[in-house]
Image (cartoon, rainbow, N blue to C red):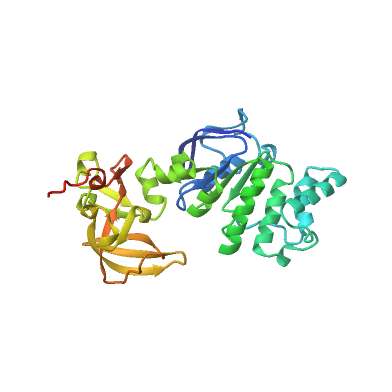
Amino acid sequence: MHVEVRGLNKRFGEFQAVSNVEFTIGKGQLIGLLGPSGGGKTSILRMLAGLESPDSGDILFHGRKVNGLPPQERGIGFVFQNYALFKHMTVAQNIAFGLEVKKWPKAKIKERIAELVELTGLVGFEKRYPHQLSGGQRQRVAFARALAPEPQLLLLDEPFAAIDAKIRHELRSWLREMIDRLGITSIFVTHDQDEAIEVADQIMIINKGRLEQKGTPREIYQDPQTPFVASFIGESTLIEDIGQLRGFADAAALGGTKGLVRPEYVEVGRANEFALLSATETGTVSHIHFRGSEWLVEVKIGDIKLTTYRSLEKPALHPGEEVHVLVHRAYLFNETDSWVTENRLKVDPLPVHI
């Protein structure tokens, strides 16, 4: 299903939940709605589902305006974060519920249940009740029930929120594979950045009811278009005056003095590890944390605190040790824009006097 939203607005009393949101979604895409709690993600999802009515704006499925259509006539499947399974029904009965409401023939319902338990990995669990299943299994039943009527659009409201971390990671991979197999257009709400980046074809960043940016996970991460996106995505350190750092003295001339520095853009080590020592700062290691595959290093340059990663293949650093710190790049931003700038001393090294 091709989805188009034009000028969508929704207010609850004095609170503007959704403000002039516009976007299009291509057939078969998996889209992540990502943003802070209360930003408007679920309100958008519920309006697409027909569970809420927009104050203004249009929702179009395949070019057809559906604003006035009830949920059951929109061709959607909805997966809730709390499963919403019928406790007194078995797995098979839960999956069949919507089909029975639509008065499908019994033989076709039985065939559809068999297809879905195979697809969702629930073979052998058909006669079990929800309380006899794990959290991951219950969510698979919820997926199967939503898919049973063969919807053209699948909507998921934080589908993995109630599941522990290990199972959540497994279900993310399973969801991606399932969507690829089915080719169904899907939109899921999440506040988990890793989840959105790992699963989605495209991410829409929603904040204070507005669509801040839409793009692939890589585009969102590497080229944030607004100050909010730059600060929200990834682990960042906000520096009020980025011009304090070597190589960024011309920040004000470029239009902004505030900067965000991500861990992967910081290199820390001893003097003999840097080919261009003139572009580095001198700092002190404040903390170091073992992360399994790498070290997480916290370092202070005067009053500025930065975080970075260090390979286990390199000699270990120690708290209190004086080190050199190279900030390769940073996001500069002002009230309206954000952009990436490189350390100027790397681009234009200081002349060497002999």
Compared with residue 120, is residue 348 higher up or lower down, i.e. above or below?
A: above
Total label count? 0
Residue under the image location 62 percent in, 56 percent down: 171
Residue 215 located left or right of residue 166: left
Q: Is residue 22 visible?
A: yes
- View extreme (top): residue: 63
**Quarter-of-image position of residue 59:** top right
- View extreme (left): residue: 354
Q: Position of residue 213 (x, y in %)?
A: 44, 40
Residue 302 located left or right of residue 223: left
Q: Is residue 192 visible?
A: no
Q: Which quarter of the figure is the N terminus placed in?
A: top right
- View extreme (bottom): residue: 319
Residue under the image location 49 percent in, 48 percent down: 34
- View extreme (front): residue: 354
Near-viewer residue (12 or 337): 337
Q: Position of residue 115 (x, y in %)?
A: 78, 49
Q: Position of residue 267 (x, y in %)?
A: 32, 57
Residue under the image location 56 percent in, 44 percent down: 45
Residue under the image location 27 percent in, 61 percent down: 272
Residue 310 located left or right of residue 60: left
**Quarter-of-image position of residue 255:** top left
Near-viewer residue (193 or 105): 193
Q: Position of residue 151 (x, y in %)?
A: 69, 41
Residue 97 located left or right of residue 168: right
